[in-house]
Image (cartoon, grey):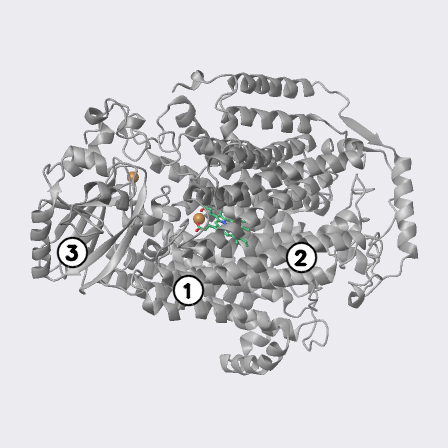
Amino acid sequence: MNIMDYGWLGKLSWDSIVFSKLFTNFSVSEVVASTAGSIVIFATVAILFLLTWFRVWGTLWSVWLTSTDHKRIGIMYIVFALVMMTRGLLEGMVMRAQQAAAPDGFLYADHFAQLFSTHGTIMIFFVAVPFVVGLVNYVMPLQIGARDVAFPVLNQISLAITASSGILLMVSLVVGEFSTGGWSAYPPYTGTDFNPGVGPDYWIWAIVFSGAGTTLTGINFTVTILKCRAVGMGFFRMPMFCWTVLCSSILMIFAMPPLSVAALMLGFDRYLDFHFFTNDLGGNMMNYANLFWLFGHPEVYLLVLPAYGIFSEVFSTYSAKRLYGYKSLVFATMSIAVLSFTVWLHHFFTMGQSPTINIVFGIATMLIAVPTGVKVYDWMATMYRGRIRFTTPMIYSIGFLILFVIGGLSGVILANPTVDFQVHNTLFLVAHFHNVLIPGVLFGLLAGYNYWFPKAFGFRLDERLGKWSAYLWIVGFMLTFFPLYGAGLLGMPRRSFSYMDLTFKPYMLVAFIGAMVVLCALVTLILQLLVSLRDRKKNRVPVGDPWDGRSLEWSISAPAPSYNFAELPRVTDRDEFTETKEQGRAYQPPKVYRNIEMPRNNPLGFILCVLSGILMFALVWYIWWLALITALAIIVVVIASTFRWDSEQIIPASQVQQDTERWLELVKNTEPVGRDLENTPQNNGYAKLEH
Amino acid sequence: MDWTAKAPIGLFQKWMQVWGEINRRSYGLAIFPFIVLLIFLFPQSISATESFLMPLGPVAHEQKTHFFWATALTMVAILPVFILVPVILIKYRRKKGKGIYAPKWESYGPLEVIMWGVPFLVIFVLSFMLWRATISLDPYEEIEGVVPPISVQVVGLDWKWLFIYPELKIATVGELVVPVHTPVSMILTSDTVMQSFWIAALAGQIYVMPGMTTKLNFIATQNGKTQGENTQYTGKGFTGQKFDVLIKNEEAFQAWVAQVRARGIALDSETYNRLAMRTTRVEVQKELGTAQMPEHALYFTLTDPQLFQSVVMRYHSGKPLNMEQQPGTEKFGQGEDAAEGAQP
Ligand code: HEM
Ligand SMILES: [Cu+2]
Ligand SMILES: [Cu+2]
């Protein structure tokens, strides 16, 4: 059928709605699918209702949706990531249940395949990436002493198209079906011949748009770090986190385009009958594999490097000690960033290339283990001769340290082409990448969430539930994924919706129990947030330095003022805030108060979010007129917005003075607390000098 | 520097000393992963026969050896972490920790050298091993045996594997039989999407791709039975895409060949097109199987010695293949021009 042969509604019909299948084909699998669809609809309605009920539409619009403040954008990114994480984790649980129930099971093969495809896509592109980008957004400008990122509106646009792509994935639960080709979407399986449905199209557009968002973010962050640092903050005075962000942003700029290109080429094949990756007419899927992993490998470092940065901050803050081996760590980070572009072929050692090529890529892969190992040792040395406090972020970090090296071990094993021939595409691999993604990336992000939360909202998160959650994550992770190493070595292929060999059954049962523990960890995490919201008065830290922090973000009030710093700081040391505290220079009023120019709110991001969402949906469903209108609208809106002259607002010096003086007054009246009382209501964010 | 100065023995004693404390406290978490890892890696594996941990030939055997060596060597860089992290945590904990406090201590030359040196040395040794093993276990390299190799052509279909023995003029689905101590030289392709061919107990995986060929060489040194499969998800029949691998001695093998010849049906293009449809092996067995064939396998006699080549060449005709002409799609073999267009 020609692509122009569709009617006004394209491929859309009543049968596309998930619930229709419940009537035509009643089964547990369809019930699961319909339940998921209902949750999406119900949650949407509930949110809309609550927003209306509490009359917060206005605030939502003027304070959040149109905001260009990097801090608010960061928070929105993280909220989005947490929502998507809940979905992704639930999908993980359902898959674990299916494999634990095998060989009987309760899902259709296609349904299971959609689950691992959405789970993988969501976890990487809509949990890990936005969570990282969100934290960086919040923290990095504060750490380098800037007022905002270099391009605040661009920042908003990045969020907009990431969010609309995520929403598209939510829509796929209700309308039509998602791809069954995994997160890597290898053609020709995802080509039109083998997958004529809309599934792969959902994947393509979600990836293309969110990928563009991430590329723009990379540019934004890189420019911010290169150009917006405070006076005196030379590169080697940047906090470690900013270094990792710099490397990670450079990776975003260079790694995302191959993915966007690969996905678009796949789109050309599917929509316009091109033959980049088809079986016939000279298409070759091996090119796709290369492009995809040329992105895919740097991607994991793009995620894990900022997590390394967070761990560095956490280890040094909670050991009350300078970060050990700063230069080593910088050098290691840089080497990892460069090396990460030289190893992509290890994802397909089994494609039949010559051993020489496998050797080169195998050794390059192993080489990454060197700087990574150095980092681990540096963190240990940071704790060595410190005064270690076992707070929630620290529990995550210690869990990371121990578990991550196991992930590193399996990584080194996988780097051997000869061994990879035997464990490739098995659960061993699944265990490996979860082993680096969960302790490595996710624990880092959760540690950062607990660590910086008080800065963002002015009150601490509940420590007891936080620790519980951390322990549950650690134990749950181990129970879920260590058995998979075993099952993989015994030969269980990944993406198996069932198996006949009952040898695997005990492993799958334990993994299922582990997944339930992870579920408890998730519930505890949510509970922690709710309890903390309830106790927010008790746990306020308005002075802004609840952990005896070392870098600039702790030198201002919590929550931070919209302009961040009343006067841009002058930096003289790597641990700038610790230094000022020790020399008694902290909490000084600026010499003069000046007017501050900040970007004004802008509706552009929100408009693009809506338009791009509709555009993607129209493209997926072949609704050409709608696609054309929205595409044109996007162009018009973007051009029109460049004619906005009053894009800046002035915060008058008097206002800044008033804020600052009120805060300094508060500091004066606050009792400094020592670290032993860190997690008690006495901690109002004023750290006592202890040494 | 108190840890570089002390001998490993001292460390060990210290480790034993902190054991008691570890078990009393939640620091026990630090060793928990170890125990779990041990439990899950090894005991069960004894019973599995479809794994390289129970090799039936030298290729898988060497892969297994290499696996253990890589694990052991990497441990050199990892064990210090497992041991020292708990030690540091206990000694330098804020409450009741006994260690000295040096808040500004941030670098120490010799330690730096160790930190870079140890992983570097480990990786150096591992790289050397990797190099040698990758060359010696190159799946494309024919294996030297006392007898000449037997060649097998493998075609990946949705969702079954077709094995063609071109010299013996037979073909099978669902069962691969090879003589013991005889090198097997495989050439592989796919007549649908990409798949990954794997007989874990004999050799590693290799991808099969439409219009392209890959190679796999191995030799079996023990009589026995194992399974092979596809590990690349290809749709709903994927988990059923398995086949038995039987390793027989020469006489038994010849007897088997005779049996296939006697009982097999002709693998003409119509039969091939039936095989190439989007069906599982069990489904196609119902269509093509006869009473003389075993339940889990199809036997064929080869009529077209160029079958394999024509499967590969299907994708090099320079003409587009529509869905009706592409094996593995839902519409394959259903269009009017199917019979003619789908000629392999
Ligand atoms: C702890 C909760 C989690 C559970 C229970 C879980 C479970 C699973 C399962 C069952 C699969 C399919 C494995 C297979 O192919 O047989 C899978 C795949 C995957 N998971 Fe997770 N997962 C979890 C967390 C995560 C996280 C946090 C990430 C990333 C940050 C992640 C990323 C992925 C990816 C990329 C895939 C591959 C999807 C594919 O095969 O295309 N998972 N996970
Ligand atoms: Cu990689
Ligand atoms: Cu190829």
Which residue is tagged 2?
Answer: A524
Looking at the picture, how far across and down is residue A412, in whole percent?
42, 58
Look at discs 3 and 1 and give the one toward the viewer. Answer: 3
Count the numbered circles shown.
3
Residue B310 visible at all: yes
Query: Gap between marks 1 and 2, in whole Å?
Result: 41 Å
Pointer 2 local density, CA inside 10 Å: few below 14, some 14–19, many at least 20: many
Disc 3 secondary structure class: strand
Q: Are marks 2 and 3 in contact (CB under 8 Å)?
A: no
Give A162 or A368, whichever is nearer the viewer.
A162
Query: Which chain letter goes with mark 2?
Result: A
B339 displayed left or right of A4:
left
Indicate the quadrant containing the N terminus of chain B: top left, top right, bottom left or bottom right: bottom right
- Quadrant where the C terminus of chain B sits is top left
Do pointers 2 and 3 mark residues of a single chain?
no
Q: Are marks 3 and 1 in contact (CB under 8 Å)?
A: no
Q: Position of residue A195 (x, y in %)?
A: 39, 33
Cβ at disc 2 under 8 Å from ligand 1: no
Give the residue pinned by disc 3.
Answer: B178
Instruction: Give the x, y percent position of residue A430.
Output: 45, 53
Check mark 3 vs ligand 3: CB closer than 8 Å? yes or no.
no
Q: Chain of mark 1?
A: B
Mark 1 sits on what residue?
A: B122
- What kind of residue is marked 2? Thr
Name the one closer to the observer, A382 or A189.
A189
Residue at the image position 15 percent from the left and 37 percent from the top:
B307
Closest to the observer: A196 or A60? A196
Distance from the alpha carbon under mark 2 to that under mark 3: 56 Å
